[in-house]
Image (tube, rainbow, N blue to C red):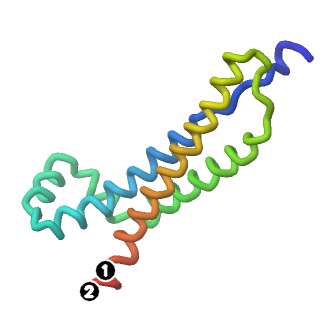
Amino acid sequence: MTDTDEIRPPSTLPAFLSLFTSTGTLICCALPALLVSLGAGAVMAGLIEAVPQLVWLGKNKALVFGVAGLLLLVSGAWQWRARSLPCPADKAQAVACARARQVSWIVWGLSVALYAIGFFFAFLAASIFY
């Protein structure tokens, strides 16, 4: 085994990228629905005035959800593949490796939950409630 063949602990980057994209789905669709349903339409109008990109996210919600869903699938597959990779033999590094795996799964689960909430408000809530 050479230095280039070194075993590295799994990266948490895919989980955090999926969290970022699934949060985007909430901002695009769940946040406006929540604000309007709470009677805070003026707050929503002010938010759109301050961040006009929200309109683009709302108009392209299929693209936003498609990219977010793809990143969630890739992240989940990456973590599933990394679940059986060995951690380093050094005790401190092994503990850090195991902790990174736990954090990655927690962040990924949170990402999936945020995605599901956003998906509900973007595609299902209008047909259920109206």
Tag 1: Cα neighbours inside 10 Å, few (<14), some, or many (≥20)? few
- Quick one: 81 or 61, which is closer to the camera? 81
Of residue 67 and residue 5, the one placed in the foreground of this image is: 5
Q: Secondary structure at mark 1?
A: helix
Relative to 123, is 70 above or below? Answer: above
Q: Is residue 92 above or below residue 126?
A: above
Quadrant of the frame with the N terminus: top right
Residue 115: x and y in percent read: 45, 59
The amino acid at mark 2 is: Tyr
At x 14% / y 66%, what residue is drawn? Answer: 38
Screen quadrant of the C terminus: bottom left
**Farthest residue in the top direction?**
3
Q: Nearer the viewer, residue 40 or 51?
A: 40
Q: Residue at x 18, y 54 (%)?
A: 48
Q: In the image, what residue occupies the spot 31% across and 54% down?
A: 27
**Considering only vertical position in the picture, is 88 above or below 10?**
above
* Label annotation for residue 126: 1
The x and y percentages for residue 91 are 72, 17
* SS at circle 2: loop
Between 129 and 4, the residue placed more toward the observer is 129
**Residue 60 x/y as whole percent:** 39, 63
Are discs 1 and 2 less than 8 Å apart at CB?
A: yes
Give the spatial CA distance, label 1 vs label 2.
5 Å
- Which amino acid type is marked by label 1? Ala
Few, some or many C-alpha atoms within 10 Å of disc 2 (few <14, some 14-19, many ≥20)? few
Q: Is 92 situated left or right of 120 in this image?
A: right
Q: Residue at x 40, y 63 (%)?
A: 117
Q: How many marks?
A: 2
Query: For residue 130, which numbered disc appears in the image?
Result: 2
Residue sitting at the far left: 42
